[in-house]
Amino acid sequence: MTRAQLDKQPDEVAAMFDRTARRYDLVNDVVSLGQVRLWRKAVAAAVDAGPGEIVLDLGAGTGSSTDAFTSLGARAIASDFSLGMLRTGVRRHGGNALTGQGVPFVAGDALRLPFADDSFDAVTISVALRNVHDTTLALKEMLRVTRPGGRLVILEFSHVTFAPFDLVYREYLMKLLPKVAKVFGSNDDSYEYLAESIRDWPDQPTLARMIQDAGWERVAWRDLTMGIVAMHRGFKPA
């Protein structure tokens, strides 16, 4: 069974997540030592979506990240290009795009989003941007579907800011993460790719420049868990 490579061909990445969907949330909880739940809360607070607002949760997978936005009173759409992830999410949440019940799940490619211009008050993507084939094009697509003055929040694995811990983290990431995933019944080849994609991802200032170059303004970031992940925020010009 072939795994996705770092050139991130969409069909390979989607197939990899299709195979991983059933155990994805469980393994994320385990390999992050529960930190993923705190990260989701931080993203929801940064998006700060209230009643009457519409949030696009891009790369939402099974929709486990989407619930945090609806709990604040906003409407939220979960979108992903892995049909396996979406099917798992629909089974767990009972929502679909046609009936409007629960969380709507919509199949969508980050490079060609199936939404009209200026549709959303906020767009967010968590630990999925680095899996997109063309980061800059995806950032421009997110800008297109966000209303003027709306906001972008990105949570992504980043570069650890404390050097002694970075050595331990990289050892865990490259050697132990795939083994832990295998123990819990997930596809260890997928987690080898994920570990390599994290190591290959640009640092915090570089990503901030990419976001700004794509047309977003007031771009800033905040490190979480010593920089294991970073949360970047930007606004569409009014």
Image (cartoon, grey):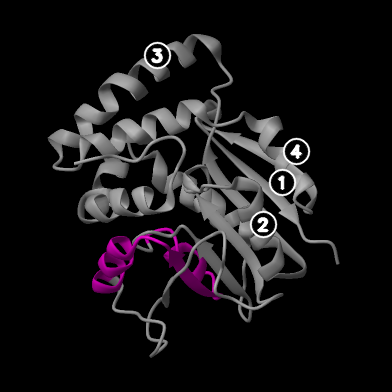
Task: Give the position of the C terminus as an image quadrant.
Answer: bottom right
- Disc 3 to disc 2, C-alpha distance: 32 Å
Circle 4 sits on which residue? 209
- Disc 1 to disc 3, C-alpha distance: 30 Å
Circle 1 sits on which residue? 211
The percent coordinates of residue 159 (x first, y second) are 55, 25
What amino acid does circle 4 point to? Answer: Arg
SS at mark 3?
Answer: helix
Q: Are marks 2 and 1 in contact (CB under 8 Å)?
A: yes
123 vs 137, nearest the viewer: 137
The mark that comes first in sequence, 2 or 4, is 2
Looking at the image, which residue sits at the far right?
A: 238
The percent coordinates of residue 36 (x first, y second) are 40, 44
Question: Relative to residue 29, is residue 40 depicted above or below?
Answer: below
Q: Is residue 115 left or right of residue 218?
A: left
What amino acid does circle 1 point to? Answer: Ile
* Residue 114 among magenta residues: no
SS at mark 1?
Answer: helix
The mark that comes first in sequence, 3 or 2, is 2
